[in-house]
Image: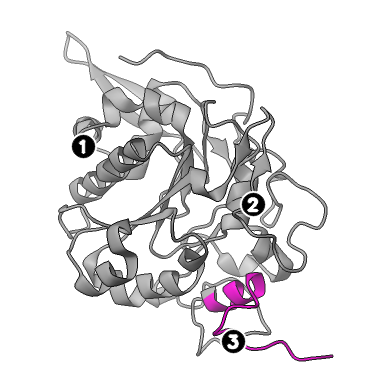
Amino acid sequence: AAPRRRPPPAAGPSGPPGPGGSGQPGTRAGGGPGAGEGSPQPARKGRLGPAGESLELKDIFIAVKTTRKYHRSRLDLLLQTWISQARGQTFIFTDWEDRELRLKAGDHMINTNCSAVHTRQALCCKMSVEYDKFLESGQKWFCHVDDDNYVNPRTLLHLLSAFSHSQDVYVGRPSLDHPIEAADHVQSDGSKTTVKFWFATGGAGFCISRGLALKMSPWASLGNFISTAERVRLPDDCTIGYIIEGLLEVKLLHSPLFHSHLENLQRLQGESVLQQVTLSYGDPENKHNVVSVGGVFGLQQDPTRFKSVHCLLYPDTIWCPAKKMS
């Protein structure tokens, strides 16, 4: 088994945000003057972290989990928007060999050969491939998102530059307001011990440092992730939390900057939208659950609001409406 390590002092039991966050949506992790004002600086520019470690976008491995039926309806939008700003760092994990997507993404489209059915086993199969590909890459940070997330590369870089990749760091947003419990080990008398832990919801995205990812290896690498998930009978994102908090005793850093479709996204308005790390949008039954940004595209042209967000962040994008001269 990997050595158990205590994390550096960080989040308390109620789960406040990571560095610089106040716990309120819109607070920029890491702070800094002018956060979210005007046009962003290029995300590729390196940032110097607390340990004197320069972090660049190329140091981050962004895994997007998708499935065959969402290649057109969801992925095309991501390729047109935020992935265009992080093409070299973004890898699309799917379950079907799509020729059209292969032409667009090249070897950054990874056919996991996992089942396309939305089951625990299929989801854990994809996460297992994501984890192994990250370890192979040699990059400093692993970030997982879903195909209904908008990622702001600049704020992601800002958040992660507050840490060293060799530290034990697991940052994201829980979807629950309490830790969950899982049966851990079966004792000789047949009774089970349980373990309580927080987990970051995969639907909002989360990031793990390379130092911590390496310690997860006994339970996560080369297919071990699938067997770990089966043992505790948990979905992929819960299993990540189980390994990190339950086994390695490293605490999740609760960040308010990650967002899933499970939240009331209309609370995010104006400039604060541009300061988040990830955004999402409601499913067809809840299509009005989107962030509040105006002045670019109407709801009919941009029902997810991702195009509007992208044009506010990257106004020089060729398909964005030209700014009117004052």
Within 10 Å of the Cα at label 3, are there few (<14), some (14-19), or many (20+) other Cα atoms? Answer: some
> Could you tell me the amino acid type at mark 3?
Phe
Mark 1 residue element: helix
Instruction: Check disc 1 and give the amino acid type.
Output: Ile
User: Label 3, on which residue?
Assistant: 297
80 to 6, vertically: above or below: below
Q: Mark 2 or mark 1, which is nearer the start of the sequence?
A: 2
The residue lying at 65 percent from left, 37 percent from top is: 162
Q: Quadrant of residue 183?
A: top left
Q: Earlier in the sequence, mark 3 or mark 2?
A: 2
Secondary element type, mark 2: loop
Give the residue type that dot 2 points to.
Lys
Mark 1–mark 2 Cα distance, whole angstroms, equals: 37 Å
Residue 45: image tag: 2
Q: CA distance from mark 1 to mark 3?
A: 43 Å
Label 1, residues with CA under 10 Å away: few <14, some 14-19, many ≥20:
many
Image depth: mark 3 or mark 2 in front: 2
Image height of 17 relative to 65, above or below: above
Where residue 59 is drawn, which disc sits there? none
Mark 3 → mark 2, Cα distance in angstroms: 29 Å
Specify which label sits upstream in the sequence, 1 or 3. Answer: 1
Q: Where's residue 298, x and y in %?
A: 58, 88
Q: Is residue 254 left or right of residue 71?
A: right
Q: Is residue 325 magenta?
A: yes
Q: Nearer the viewer, residue 188 or 105?
A: 105
Kindly identify which residue carries mark 1. 226
Q: Nearer the viewer, mark 1 or mark 2?
A: 2
User: Does residue 233 appear in the picture of this structure?
Assistant: yes
Asked if one can make out residue 277 in the rendered structure from this viewpoint, the answer is no
Residue located at (57% from left, 36% from top): 253
Picture coordinates of residue 241, whole percent (x, y) = 40, 34
Residue extent of the magenta highlight: 307-326
